[in-house]
Amino acid sequence: MAEPKNKLPPPVKKSRRPGMPQMPKFPRGDSFWVNVATSVLVLLLLAGAYSYFAGGAATKTEDIALSQVAQDIAAGKVTSVEVSDNDLKIIYTDKTEKKSKKEPEASLSDTLKNYGVTPAALDKVSINVARESGFQYWLIALAPFFAPILLLGFFVWYLSRQVRGAGMQAFSFGQSKPRVIDPGDSAQRVTFKDVAGAKEAKQELLEIVDFLKNPKKFLDIGARIPKGILLMGAPGTGKTLLARAVAGEAGVPFFSISGSEFVEMFVGVGASRVRDLFLTAKRAAPAIIFVDEIDAVGRVRGTGVGGGNDEREQTLNQILVEMDGFEPNEKVIVMAATNRPDVLDPALLRPGRFDRRVTIDLPDRQDRLDILGIHARQKPLAEDVNLMVIAERTPGFSGADLYSLMNEGAILAARENRKTVAQFDLIRSIEKVMLGPERKSHVLNKKEKEITAYHEAGHALVASVLPYADPVHKISIISRGRAAGYTLKLPFEDKKMQSKKEFLDDIAMSLGGYVAERLVFGDITTGPSNDLQVLTGLARTMVTRYGMSNLGTIAFEGDGGRAMFGTGVDGAHYSEKVSAQIDAEVKKIIDEAYEKAEAIIKEHRKLLNAIAARLVEKETMEREEFEQMLVLHGVEPKKKEDILVEPQVVNF
């Protein structure tokens, strides 16, 4: 694959003195002013609410003069008077309430008599004197002074809460925070029954389960169980699930943490967290520690990769010491997972540490069937569902891909308001997982539709004629994901190896769309760009890694284009002359494939036109219809033979 044209320069890392911690990250300035504005708004709302209720309460009761009170009592309109200090609350016979004030240094009865109220009229009125307690008195007296102080204190506390929390977190940085699964938690417990496929891997891990259950049997005979188990495999093959299944089968606590969680802010935090993690596991022994993506901290030391920061190396050193240091950990087993075992430090892989390496491959057809059965347990399937057909059409799928397939099938059924998942839903889910959802809004004009049809017809025609190419299962010019159309090739059987002849036919098949456009329209479009990238990378891999060229049995590069033998990534280890020879060999392979595809399309031009016309009309062709068209034009459909392992999708 070619490097991106607009490649950004690597970020410049600022250095600091060793052993000097970084300052805690405080809230940004914009967050501070947001908090200030929020607090001011709260204060205004509280003040407004107080004014509203206080004002509203004042308008409910009418204030009258004391002389008016005396007249109303003499007239028999008042039923009771409540005296609170100098305040009077008068209740009339019609249940209305009014307020008044009495003279401060005189009793109410004397004052009313002075206003001409007779003792007989006064006897008809119930007079109640309410005396305030000491607490209530002082509360009312001091409330106007303390209320603003309390509001101001709340305002300061609200602003400083985040800053104080950020500062206090520094004291807990050295503690590990693993996710713990208790053996008694049946909701999260996973056993080998929940893991399909990976038979050899489960057989290796059964010894670990036996040791955790019966350690005395091994120790009595002088055997020591491996302390470290490294799970290696492609993404989505179930490494984490297998580790959880070991803990579930043995019934021991499971401490799970990611490799990137060891290194965060302060120098030395990673090593401190490793010590804390192992100390926690020892207290709960027998137990399992699982480190996911261990290559985040376990890369080869001394290569200069990582910007010169030795925090990752300190963390790795602490892991090495904890696994095989001065203190033996007989009942703590460390499991780790990675899909990059080639970049791990040799000290991690030596005997006494991760000395047992378990490889988890992509599932074969029977394993895929078992995995689909597990994921179908909670899904109501229709009578027409045949999981074996789905397993046959998904070579190269990982366990995660199969889970996504079953989930997408259920989503499609629910979207159409059906209660069961049909076979058609699962077939559509295969293409959705591989390519993405249909883009029905991406409508091609008549000319583009015709170009796309000839492009995909060219792929399908070349693949059907070449003897070592995979059989075509479906052709479509309906947009999916980033592809305007696609030709789906699937093998009949799984294989672990691929020959040079198969590589060459695959490159010619990838050129089928490019050649068809050029021969039919006399021009080319941007459509074959992905095809050219894929076939160029494949041809270069044949030359530089597999020795499938005239340069001989020499591997110039390792996996992913990296230099070999652990020498880092400082450039290619061959001369400019050899580089020119590699380019020439790559061009030679592609040119020969182009001539092969061009000859096939010229010979079967009528078949090409028929396939393209049918695609323009129906937009999709399944395998049965396509093979019938091949027979009508004298081309024999493919039967079972040695073919590729993974499904090959050619995008337009």
Image: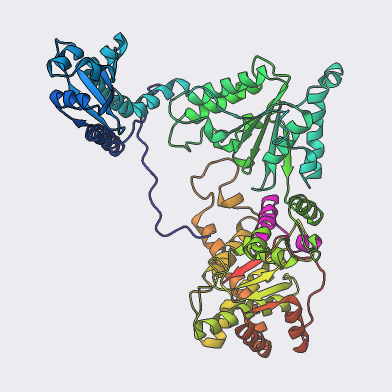
Instruction: Give left or right: position of 522 versus 407.
Output: left
Q: Could you tell me what secondary structure mostly forms the magenta stretch?
A: helix
Q: Quadrant of residue 321?
A: top right
The region drawn magenta spans: 388-409
- For the residue pair 651 and 429, the one nearer the viewer reads as 429
Question: 474 above or below 152?
Answer: below
Question: 513 above or below 288?
Answer: below
Residue 358: image x %, image y %? Answer: 73, 39
- For the residue pair 26 and 132, the one nearer the viewer reads as 132
Q: Is residue 457 shown to the viewer in this render?
A: yes
At 62% from the left and 63% from the top, the residue drawn is 415
Colour scheme: rainbow
Q: Quadrant of residue 127?
A: top left
At 53% from the left and 30% from the top, the residue drawn is 262
Residue 5: image x %, image y %? Answer: 42, 60
Residue 134: image x %, image y %? Answer: 29, 9
Taking the magenta stretch, the answer to whether it contains residue 328 is no
- For the residue pair 516 and 364, the one nearer the viewer reads as 364
Q: Quadrant of residue 323?
A: top right
Residue 344: image x %, image y %? Answer: 60, 36
Question: 632 above or below 65?
Answer: below
- Quarter of the image that includes the C terminus: bottom right
Taking the magenta stretch, the answer to whether it contains residue 408 is yes
- Number of callouts in the render? 0
Q: Is residue 551 shown to the viewer in this render?
A: no
